[in-house]
Amino acid sequence: LGSAPPLSGSVRQMVVPPSRPSVMDAKREEAITKKDEERKAKAEELKVDKAAKAAVRTKELDAREVHKLREAEKADAIKVLAEKREENIAKKEAERKAKADAIKDRKGGTKKAKYSRQDVTLLKAVYDEYDADGSGSGSIAGLQ
């Protein structure tokens, strides 16, 4: 495989003239440039659209966070009110119990007497018979 023999005169060599921009080349370049600009515009539009959607998502997240915070505040307020209510109920129950105890003490409901009222009246009548001077105190002189 040596070198190829030189071409004979029967084969014409094609000589391409130096390239000059033709109308077709200009149109091709113009179409390519136009397509590139359209792609760049579309890419920029997509970036703007993505940024807008991200902003909306952020606002939605912020709204959710605000809603969660409000719900937590409501729950705390309800808890505080429930605690106050329980304290008021306990306070009123203590007052009712104290009042009931005072009524029982006045009526003698909590203390049972050792002797019945009838026995005490009878014993007082007997004592009054022996208490001659009516002083209410017992003495040997009063018994004689």
Image (cartoon, rainbow, N blue to C red):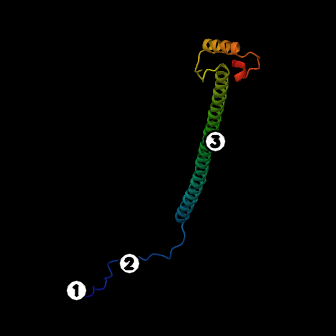
Q: Tell me the residue at 60%/23% (across/down).
A: 111
The disc placed on residue 1 is 1
Q: Relative to residue 76, is residue 120 depicted above or below?
A: above
Q: Quadrant of the N terminus?
A: bottom left
Distance from disc 2 to disc 1, alpha carbons, whole Å, reads 24 Å
Q: Which numbered disc flags the more N-terminal residue, 2 or 1?
A: 1
Q: Nearer the viewer, mark 2 or mark 1?
A: 1
- Residue type at tag 2: Gln
Query: Is 126 left or right of 135, judged from the image as shown?
Result: left
Q: Which numbered disc flags the more N-terminal residue, 1 or 3?
A: 1
Q: Secondary structure at mark 2?
A: loop
Q: Relative to residue 87, is residue 26 depicted above or below?
A: below
- Residue 57 vs residue 80, the one in the foreground: 80
- Residue 87 vs residue 122, the one in the foreground: 122
Q: Tell me the residue at 66%/19% (across/down).
A: 107
Distance from disc 1 to disc 3, alpha carbons, whole Å, reads 93 Å
Q: Quadrant of the C terminus?
A: top right
The quadrant holding residue 12 is bottom left
The disc placed on residue 73 is 3
- Residue type at tag 1: Leu
- Residue 6 vs residue 29, the one in the foreground: 29
Q: Which residue is mark 2?
A: 13
Q: Which numbered disc flags the more N-terminal residue, 2 or 3?
A: 2
Q: Secondary structure at mark 3?
A: helix
Q: Relative to residue 98, is residue 6 depicted above or below?
A: below
Distance from disc 2 to disc 3, alpha carbons, whole Å, reads 92 Å
- Residue type at tag 3: Glu
